Image (tube, rainbow, N blue to C red):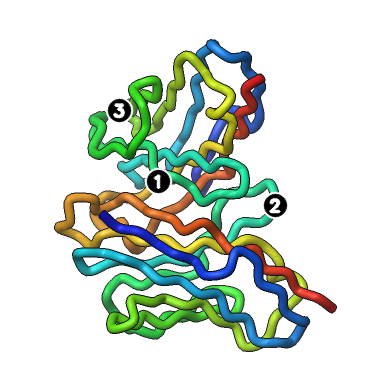
Amino acid sequence: AQSVTQLGSHVSVSEGALVLLRCNYSSSVPPYLFWYVQYPNQGLQLLLKYTSAATLVKGINGFEAEFKKSETSFHLTKPSAHMSDAAEYFCAVSESPGGTSYGKLTFGQGTILTVHP
Amino acid sequence: DAGVTQSPTHLIKTRGQQVTLRCSPKSGHDTVSWYQQALGQGPQFIFQYYEEEERQRGNFPDRFSGHQFPNYSSELNVNALLLGDSALYLCASSPLQGFGNTIYFGEGSWLTVV
């Protein structure tokens, strides 16, 4: 079975500061990893994904994440926070092709990001 | 090109009733998955449909059932509603091949059970 742990249910930063949202995963097979953002009363928007290509993945809105197999981590970062980044962020894992659960996303509990002026 | 569309957007049901939620996948996508997102939690996988068959299922009771039509659209049915079924229900579509590269979520259907 796969699982995701997001460290910190709430993260608060100042505008212009570094954003770091932590995600650790557990998977018995090579994983695919995703970060999604959810604004209030909306669905999920894909920020970026790791699908076994480059370990440093760049996404939309200036976000990036690095897959570290040895640490089973996929932390999300952004060099400079904007007010518009305030939202809830979800890390998710899926098995890669060939896995019995390929196509199923397992999500973490989410991290609410607050950005202060 | 429309993305994933879900209906209805909001609905209120009474305990014990039944509900049907609908999802139209993005054009070209043949796989539909359903997720339940309770307030303050991450989405939880309910089941996935491909070629009109349930391909895999999460840890949800049989009260949750689904269907996929030949045009790839899908329905989620929940019988004997409980208060705990109140949640945002999300539909995701993707091609089964290349799932990791293209998976899109709809805006969801908010279900309140009273």
Q: Which label belongs to residue A40?
A: 2
Label 2 marks a residue whose chain is A
- Of badges 1 and 3, the one in the foreground is 1
Q: Picture coordinates of residue A108 (x, y %)? A: 46, 58
- Look at the numbered discs 3 and 2 and tell me whether their residues touch, using CB distance below 8 Å: no
Q: Kindly identify which numbered label has been placed on residue B70.
A: 3
Quarter holding residue B71: top left
Residue in view at x 58 percent, y 80 percent: A20
In front: label 3 or label 2: 2
Q: Nearer the viewer, mark 1 or mark 2?
A: 2
Residue B95 horizontal side relative to residue A12, left or right? left
Q: Position of residue A54 (x, y in %)?
A: 32, 83
What's the residue at 49%, 39% (across, down)?
B36
Q: Mark 3 is on which residue type?
A: Pro
How far across and down, in percent of the image, does residue B4 sit?
50, 43
Pick the quarter of the image with the C terminus of chain B.
Answer: top right
Instruction: Report whether B23 appears left or right of B57.
Output: right
Q: Contact, CB < 8 Å: mark 1 with mark 3?
A: no
User: In the picture provided, is A80 more to the left or to the right than B84?
Assistant: right
Residue reaching furthest to the top: B16
